[in-house]
Image (tube, rainbow, N blue to C red):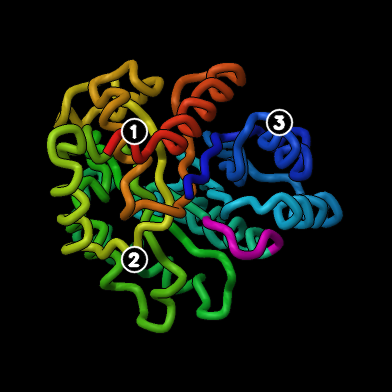
Amino acid sequence: MIHIGCHLSISKGFAAMGNEMLSMGGDTFAFFTRNPRGGRVKELDSADVEALNVFLREHAFAALVAHAPYTMNLCSDKDRAREYAEECFSEDLGKMEMLPGNFFNFHPGNSLKQDREACIDRIAEILNRYITPDQSTTVLLETMAGKGTEIGRTFEEIRSILDRVDEDKRARVGVCFDTCHVWDAGYDIVGDLDGVLAEFDRIIGLHNLKAVHLNDSKNTCGSHKDRHEKLGEGCIGEEALRRVVTHPLLDGRPFILETPNERAGYVKEIAEVRGWEKNAERYR
């Protein structure tokens, strides 16, 4: 079964996001845990959050994929930036427990001029410090395009972070597979999707792939640029993205659109993905 949604604004509250996504035809969604470009977050309204929890159960929504702010770099070379990132991670992970059973996704970080292995150590250190075996939230490392000094541009780098997570906390850590990012990183999901998924399984394990960011790309494979495009209008193309959505190894995961759209565009793409699901057997 395909679960599809997009990013929504939290400005009108949690319950409002659930109603908005239902009206758009989706059954999952993403939201930023705070301003994506940084800043503190206001206190949550517990009644509003609980109203969303009830709504999600009543309408059989799939897991949500909350997103940490882009400015959260756990391995920054600046002391204050690292402190801020740690504050974001610990505070937002704690607040996610008010929405039990969902995902908290983040970009692993940028090494800048530092040793990459030392940065990977730092990321894992923070995961081990704040993740607890009994929490309900699963933390997701996002696959990255390799722009600049991004950590997570290869499956091996993601695996190296996972390997450093304490064994009793590993069940609460997974991966978000971003189609634009893996394509821009050099994984040919157009010409060899089965091969890419087999490589992911061999290195990371498909059981660790918990969610998918569904995006086309403005750039060619291996460009390392991270420029998202609307579905079917980029270098990945509709046919390849349809194969991703309907691939049996990805069945049941929440798919989150991060395409450059307004509401009407997301409604159109959600309907398109629903159509791909309906006609999946005909495509095979």
The magenta stretch spans residue 160: no
Left or right: where does residue 115 sit relative to residue 60? left
Report, in whole angstroms, how far the alpha carbon at label 1 lies from the one at label 3.
23 Å
Farthest residue, direction front:
282
Residue 23 is marked as: 3
| Above or below for 117 versus 246 | below
What numbered label is drawn on residue 13?
none
Circle 2: element type? helix
Quickly name the residue at label 1.
242
Mark 3: few/some/many CA within 10 Å (<14, 14-19, 20+): few
What type of secondary structure mainly makes up the magenta span? loop
Residue 11, x across and y down, in percent: 73, 33
Q: Secondary structure at mark 1?
A: helix
Amino acid bearing label 2: His
Among the two numbered marks 3 and 2 on one chain, the one whose residue lies closer to the N terminus: 3
Report which quarter residue 146 is drawn in.
Answer: top left
Which element carries disc 3, helix, strand or loop? helix
Q: Position of residue 257 (x, y in %)?
A: 47, 33
User: Sequence order check: which comes first, mark 1 or mark 3?
Assistant: 3
- CA gap between label 3 and label 2 equals 31 Å
Q: Which residue is mark 2?
A: 207
- Type of residue at label 3? Ser
**Which region shows up in magenta?**
98-103
Whether residue 220 sits left or right of residue 181 in the image: it is left
